[in-house]
Image: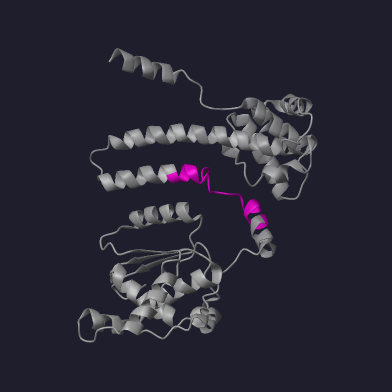
Amino acid sequence: MAEQLSFHSSGSDRLPPQNIEAEEAILGGIMLDPEAIGRVSDSLIPEAFYISAHKDIYQAALRLHSQGKPTDLLSVTSWLTDHEILVRIGGRNKLATLVDRTVSAVNIDALAGLVMEKYLRRQLIKAGNEIVHLGYETETELPKILDQSQQKVFQLSNQSFGSNTEHNSTITIAAYKELDSGSPIYSTGLDELDNLMVGFEGGTLTIVAGRPSMGKSQISLQLALKMILLHDLPVAIFSLEMTKKQLEYRLWSLISVTNAYKHLGLTPLRSDRIRRHRAKFQPLADWEFTLIAKIVDIASELPLYMNDSRGITVSQIASECRQIKAKEGKLGLVVKDLSNGCS
């Protein structure tokens, strides 16, 4: 017990990971070199600064940059003065000292990476403490505890910390830049459907609804295959209606009539043909087994994931998607096939 108390006491005396010199050099470089802010604005978040005054100065520079204004010493000083923050950060002398100590901004990218690393280490310590507390919440169901713990770790690995609330001046500049950046809206591959909805856009929810047995699962599977073939995007399907093997049989049938595989000379394969074989009504012929073997080779290479857990929750779906994205590097489309008339 004595060793344990000694460990906790020692740990509480340690300073959180930080690099004040790097923070100062970044701010000095931003005020010294007009191009410096553009090299770090997308990767370095204000919350990464350990010193609150440094965060205020960096936020001022970001605001000026988003408005197309210079981030030199005079401009930053003026902005902080107008917003009554100058005294809080240490006055003009503080800003002048940052510039005087900086020779150039040539290493600002590396310094920004260092500051972000220290920030993420602090967040790791914070997440670890929060996970410890979650472990003691015995009144909360274990699956929920595990999901919350996993979310904290995945957020760290994706460097997705910081507030998502932004001033509209930042949002409007980003939205305008997106017009020329080619940020895609992915076509569905079905012309008439694209005329109606243009295509799939990241972060949006699309509902395919209809009465039972109208083909919702089939159209969802077709859209999934289109995303893979047209845009090279991994897809995840969560089915609350059919099993993974039932979906797989339908996928084989779909592959057999897909234009992308016409050059392989595939013969159309009806999904009910497989059902008849399994029911021993009409066994598959040798040539059909040969055909299916070709299709299986194709299907096994697709970046497609299926889950048929009936009781899966939204948080569990999110957890599965995070794991797929970590494995593939991206995730294009998530299909949730329900049994109540929506897909």
> Is residue 187 in the magenta section?
no
Instruction: Specify the farthest residue to the left.
Output: 280
Q: How many marks?
A: 0
> Is residue 157 in the magenta section?
yes
Residue 21 percent coordinates (x, y): 66, 26
Task: Name the foreground residue: 164 vs 6.
Answer: 6
- Residue 97, quarter of picture: top right
For the N terminus, give its image quadrant: top left
Which residues lie in the magenta part? 154-173
**Position of 21 relative to 256 (above/below):** above
- 208 vs 233, left or right, is left
- 229 vs 342, left or right, is right
Residue 324 percent coordinates (x, y): 43, 56
Q: Name which residue lies at 53% across and 27% down.
A: 17
- Residue 58, quarter of picture: top right
- 91 vs 131, left or right, is right
Residue 277 percent coordinates (x, y): 25, 82
For the C terminus, give its image quadrant: bottom left
